[in-house]
Image (spheres, helix red, strand yellow):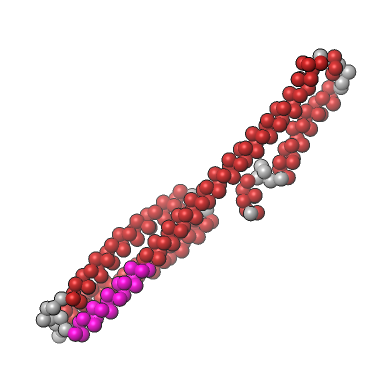
Amino acid sequence: MNKTKNGPPSIVAYYILDEMVDNNFSHLQQLEELTANLEEEIMEKTDTNAIRKLFTLKSRMVSFNKILWYERGVIFNLRKTQAACMTAKARGLFDTAHEFLTRQIDIVESYREIMTDAINVYLSTISNKINSAIKALTVVIFYLTVVTTLTSFPNTVATFFGISQFGNTDYVIIYAAIILSIVLPLLWLWRSKWLRPDERSVNR
């Protein structure tokens, strides 16, 4: 009020709008901190809570951006008015406020792009996890098919050639062969890390 008591109405309007423009910078600083924290959270853990916060923040950015556009529209109209109370000094001040609002809009747009990139990273991470799970399931199905084939082989041979073909075979040998046919493929898959999709993705 001390700045405006001896000024024309245009100067009074400028100082009121200038307070609003200055307050926008504090909101932009909070947006920067929230954006950085959400980026780190999404990179460390991809849960629904983080993506919910991200979408909420992006929605608030859209609303905040609209407010900035409205403020800039008001200042633009005041700059172009031909009223007698609009002095040359006031026009210069409104030009400065208009530039500040333009920068603030650009900053918000940059943060929105960062949020969009973070969403893409989240979706890519989820897609990679789904692909790893499908690959692991495929390997398990293949392993079970191999085990089923190997364990049913003695029964198939006995059916074709008769039980007498295995009459002199020790049961220990038969059980050992069946167990080895199960354990050996399992060990091979484990050593190849096919049964550990998370570790494969980390190594990549």
Kindly give the residue lying farthest to the left in the view shown. Answer: 84
**Image point 41% across, 51% down: which residue?**
52
Query: Magenta includes 137?
Result: no
In the figure, 74 relative to 199: above or below?
Answer: below
**Chain part drawn in magenta:** 88-107
Seen from the viewer's position, the closer of residues 15 and 1 is 15
How far from the left and from the top, in percent, is residue 1? 19, 80
In the figure, 97 relative to 64: above or below?
Answer: below
Residue 9 is left or right of residue 69, and the answer is: left
In the figure, 58 relative to 185: above or below?
Answer: below
Query: Magenta includes 106?
Result: yes
Give the dominant element type of the magenta stretch: helix, strand or loop.
Answer: helix
How far from the left and from the top, in percent, is residue 203? 65, 54
Q: Quadrant of residue 134?
A: top right
Residue 36 is left or right of residue 88, and the answer is: right
Residue 169 is left or right of residue 37, and the answer is: right
Residue 129 is left or right of residue 168, and the answer is: left
**Image point 36% across, 69% down: which residue?**
106
Q: Quadrant of residue 149?
A: top right
**Image point 21% across, 81% down: which residue?**
91
**Image point 71% across, 43% down: which residue?**
190
Kindly give the residue lying farthest to the right in the view shown. Answer: 168
How far from the left and from the top, in percent, is residue 42? 49, 56
Q: Is residue 136 visible?
A: yes
Q: Is residue 34 visible?
A: no
How far from the left and from the top, in percent, is residue 126? 51, 48
Q: Quadrant of residue 174?
A: top right
